[in-house]
Amino acid sequence: MAILAQTTNFVARTQATLEKAHRYQEKYNIFVTIDDEGAIQKAQELEQKAQAGAKLGQLAGVIYAAKDNFLCPGSDTTASAKILTDFKSPVTSTVIEKLNAEDAILIGKTNLDAFAHGSSTENSYFGPTKNSKDLERVAGGSSGGSAVAVALEIVDFALGTDTGGSIRQPASFNGVYGLKPTYGANSRYGVVAMASSTDCIGFFTQTAQDLDLLMQITSGQDPKDLTTLPDFYRHDDGFNDPIKRIGIIKEFDNDAVDPEIRQAMAQEIETLKNQGHEIIELDMPTLKYALATYYIIVPAEIASNLARHDGIRYGFRSADSEDLMSLYQNTRNEGFMSENKRRIMIGNYVLSSGYYDAYYLKAAKARTMIIEEYNQAFKQCDFILTPVSPNPAFKLGEKVNDPVAMYLEDVMSVPLNLAGLPGLTVPVGKTTAGLDLGLQFIGPRRSDAKLINFVANIKEKN
Ligand code: GLN
């Protein structure tokens, strides 16, 4: 398990990494682009800097990949959607800028469900990414490529986005750590928007300690994203307070959850008890509305955010159009995946006059109740432990034609996005078939530093 630290032999290490990335690409379909030229150039610059005796950044030579919904010039940013193919971004996302300023080396952009809509990376225009432990199974999603790139140890860490589980679920399916920070912790500037009120920028790593370093570097207020929180990530503020009480949600322990995941939960609870933690049973009856609430609010925001893709401003434009209206229609029809279209239609429906009150407004109220339920829960406990999803990695093709089955994947991951809370996937072992199992710890808003520290400590003791 690598802990992120400055490396040496920048060019040789980058070359070896690129070679490995290309080799695995054929088998797993991890990347949308591998930027050989850009990565080597950065490595050469670092080598020159080092030779000149200049001070190197905290991540000098650390190699990473970014989900292909992070904008950066140098390669296309497609969000794995046809409608963005050939789109060259004029801007760099704030998070990538901060990582590059610390001399990390970006080697490529990873595959995702188009526009991050999905839980398996099968909704990608470039085809699915394969699971790191079983080529017949999904990588999880939507940040499947980033999860697999870290699981196969191609890169030291990877960037992802989590709107409703897209970091935590693929992390769990591939045996790596995955952090979805508090909403507003990391700038969303320069990241293709899915649902602006729940989108979060986070990481896949091989250790919890790595998350700590990355959050120190990337979080904080950004004038380009007015939802960012000032002075966010600190080690003071009760950072080392003893964490005693871990909440378990009763409603999540039921027959719909895979027996091996229930067993992993039971084992983790034992470990926590042995380490002196108190387990608190929580009643959270409102959470059963979270999935329905999410699948109203998120499509509504998607419909608004995707309205800008008209064939005029970005990337792909349909060739056979006679007038402006058919250009819009054909571009959007050919450029979006079915899942994108489904969400645009649901979103416009729930926002339309006559249905707004019945759906969107009701969902907004339910969201407030969910936030309140978490507030009450965190009066009784410090962190909450739950499964990430009801099952381990499923077979390719198993759910992709059944949207409701795919949405049900998200039943345990979306509630905290609605409340803006941090969640951290921790790998806890394997199924008898050798698939990875992860569980998630959830904290109150702004508890990210404590949450990461807590997880690092329990893993060290284990
Ligand atoms: N699987 C969820 C969805 O399809 C979450 C996606 C995400 O977090 N980007 O909406």
Image (spheres, rainbow, N blue to C red):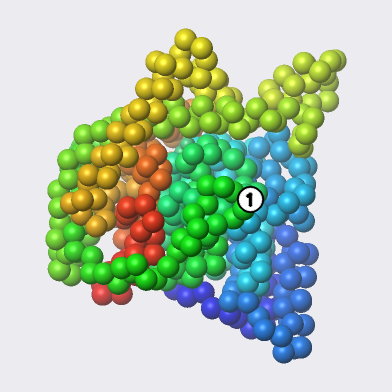
* In the image, residue 114 above or below residue 175: above
Does residue 394 appear anywhere in the picture? no
Horizontally, residue 352 falls left or right of residue 71, namely: left
Which residue position is annotated with label 1? Answer: 224
Q: Quadrant of the N terminus?
A: bottom left
Q: Amino acid at mark 1?
A: Lys
Does residue 330 appear anywhere in the picture? yes
Mark 1 CB in 8 Å range of ligand 1?
Answer: no
- Where residue 324 sits, quadrant-wise, is top right
Residue closer to the observer: 405 or 46: 46
Residue closer to the observer: 203 or 260: 203
- Where residue 156 sits, quadrant-wise, is bottom right
Residue in the picture at 65% in, 54% down: 93
- Where residue 355 sits, quadrant-wise, is top left
Residue 412 coordinates in the image, percent (x, y)? 33, 41
Residue in the picture at 22% in, 60% down: 268
Residue in the picture at 14% in, 61% down: 278
Residue closer to the observer: 159 or 198: 198
Residue 427 coordinates in the image, percent (x, y)? 36, 60
User: Is the residue marked by circle 1 packed among few (<14), some (14-19), or many (20+) residues within 10 Å?
Assistant: few
Residue closer to the observer: 179 or 380: 380
The extreme right residue here reads 322
